[in-house]
Image: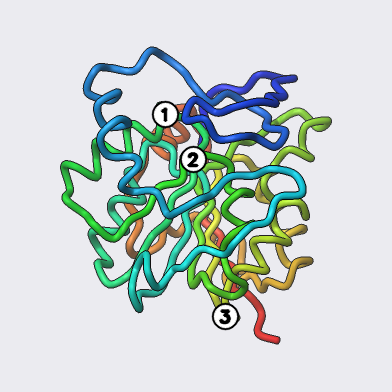
Amino acid sequence: MNDDHTDDADHIGSHPTGAPWRNFYGRFKGKTLRDSQEEYLEQDLASLSPGKVTWEENSDRENLDLEALFGKRDVWLEIGFGGGEHMVHQAATYPDVGIIGCEPYINGVAMLLGKIRTAGVENVAVHPGDVRHMFDVLPEASVSRAFLLYPDPWPKRRHHRRRFVTPEHLAPLARVLKPNAIFRVATDIPDYVRQTIKEVPLQGFTLLNPDSATWQDKWDDWISTRYEQKAYREGRKPHYLTFQRNAP
């Protein structure tokens, strides 16, 4: 959910929080953070961490203890939460669910932390990094719902392999989702819709709204985000796709 893209940005090294990286395309920091945002990062981020979620080659990884994190709640996962509007809205709407959000863009993380303070929600955990790190430590079949909302479009054809809707990302997502779990995708890019409809079912999902006439129907619990509003301002039509993880 990043507005800007550098064509050949391939970052290898450390995130501003100190976490190591796989190859990562895009930027992880934008404008200088406000003092209040720096405060959120310093005071709130550590306490909202879901646990040790780092990536190092050949390292031993232990699964997260989701019961210790959220008790008996169902666990949902938001992949790239942008400014955090949707994640906080979902947390407030469903207090009996635990929501993990992953976002490498540190400015977005700071924005989310401010919204969490304002809303007072407590059923959230925040990973300021690549969701692939989270896939490494989530137990198999542990997540009941996942959201991919206005992901980086990578519009140039040679960059389509960087999109989330590729086997590199979808296969581990399928592993951590429970049978019959829901996967929601929102995008305003027609070619992203095409690729999503092609690739996601190959990893064991069924599209629940196959009629293209319904693709602009918003979910009942949807909240408009700045990315959706930008799409409307620029004359693009958002699409809302709902998939279900197939049962064995």
Q: Residue at x 65, y 35 (%)?
A: 21
* Relative height, residue 44 to residue 63 (above, below): above
Q: Secondary structure at mark 1?
A: helix
Residue highlighted by disc 1: 233
Residue highlighted by disc 3: 180
Q: Is residue 141 left or right of residue 36?
A: right
Viewer-proximal residue among 140 and 224 = 140
- Crowd tier of the residue under label 2, counting other residues whose Cα lies within 10 Å: few below 14, some 14–19, many 20 or above: many
What mark, if any, has residue 225 been given in the picture?
Answer: none
Q: Position of residue 179 (x, y in %)?
A: 60, 81
Q: Is residue 182 visible?
A: yes
Viewer-proximal residue among 166 and 239 = 166
Return the disc, 1 or 3, that comes first in the chain's sequence: 3
Distance (Cα) linking label 1 and label 3:
35 Å
Distance (Cα) linking label 2 and label 1:
25 Å
Residue highlighted by disc 2: 103
- Crowd tier of the residue under label 1, counting other residues whose Cα lies within 10 Å: few below 14, some 14–19, many 20 or above: few
- Crowd tier of the residue under label 3, counting other residues whose Cα lies within 10 Å: few below 14, some 14–19, many 20 or above: some
